[in-house]
Image: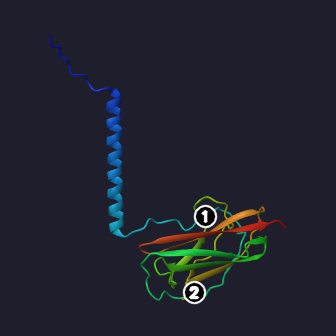
């Protein structure tokens, strides 16, 4: 005697898993397509120079330029990296701090002159040393740009300061910390 089996409809769990796999595959393909289009255009997403600004704010830090700004000798277009140093690392409110950024090529570590760098609030949300920021500085022929800032009057603790620079095809940032001690 033979038995016949009737075809069964797919289970709802199988349909749901197939649908989710299809959605994930479509998302992956769109991500790859977007990456390819952005890479081909040579553009970098714009990052805001100042993350937050408060209205009616009196600056708690003053800044003066310690670097001589120079005109860019050439328009650098390759990949570059930044380092940021702060001296001294531990200060009291009202003391001066020297903040220095160094820009160099990622492959040969050669200094990059003529690159405009700025200080800004840390984009990772760390407590910022400053609430107002000095003007951007241009790196000199040693790849360095500096600011002299006055430590603000705020609670003792560790605060971060960040630098950022961007060209037509590349952007980079670096940060450092400052320990603000009590009076």
Answer left or right for 122 relative to 154.
left
Along the horizontal axis of the image, is 94 left or right of 109? right
Viewer-side label of 2, 1: 1
Residue 152 x, y percent position in the rendering: 74, 69
**Colour scheme of the rendered structure:** rainbow
When asked about the image quadrant of residue 57, the answer is: bottom right
Q: Nearer the viewer, residue 10 or 152?
A: 10
Tag 1: Cα neighbours inside 10 Å, few (<14), some, or many (≥20)? Answer: many
- The location of residue 3, given as percent across then percent down, is 18, 14
Measuring 58% from the left and 83% from the top, which residue is drawn there? 144
Q: Earlier in the sequence, mark 2 or mark 1?
A: 2
Horizontal and vertical percent position of residue 110: 50, 84
Task: Give the labeled residue for mark 2.
Answer: 69
Vertical placement of residue 140 versus 127, above or below: below
* SS label for mark 1: loop
Residue 39 sits in quarter: bottom left
Location of residue 36 with respect to 63 vertically, above or below = above
| Residue sitting at the far left | 1
Return the residue nearer the eye: 68 or 87: 87
At a point 82% along the width and 65% down the height, the residue shown is: 182
**Mark 1 — residue?**
122
Query: Would you say the residues marked 2 and 1 are in contact, meaning their CB atoms lie under 8 Å apart?
Result: no
On screen, residue 37 versus residue 73, left or right, reads left
| Quadrant into which the C terminus falls | bottom right
- Say which quadrant the N terminus sits in: top left
Question: Mark 2: which secondary structure?
Answer: loop
**Residue 25 % position (x, y):** 33, 46
Q: Quadrant of residue 21?
A: top left
Quote the CA–CA distance across marks 2 and 1.
Answer: 24 Å
């Amino acid at each position: 005697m033979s038995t016949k089996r009737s075809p069964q409809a797919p289970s709802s769990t199988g349909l749901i898993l197939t649908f989710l796999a299809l959605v994930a595959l479509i998302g992956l393909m769109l991500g790859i397509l977007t990456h390819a289009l952005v890479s081909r255009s040579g553009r970098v997403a714009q990052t805001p120079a100042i993350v937050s600004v408060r209205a009616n704010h009196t600056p708690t830090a003053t800044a003066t330029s310690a670097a001589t700004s120079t005109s860019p000798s050439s328009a650098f277009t390759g990949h570059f990296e930044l380092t940021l140093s702060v001296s001294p690392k531990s200060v009291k409110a009202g003391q001066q701090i020297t903040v220095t950024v160094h820009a160099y090529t990622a492959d040969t570590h050669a200094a990059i002159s003529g690159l405009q760098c700025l200080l800004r609030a840390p984009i990772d949300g760390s407590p910022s040393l400053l609430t107002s920021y000095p003007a951007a500085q241009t790196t000199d022929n040693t790849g360095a740009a500096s600011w002299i800032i006055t430590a603000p009057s705020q609670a003792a603790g560790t605060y971060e300061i960040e630098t950022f620079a961007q060209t037509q095809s590349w952007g980079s940032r670096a940060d450092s910390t400052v320990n603000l001690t009590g009076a």
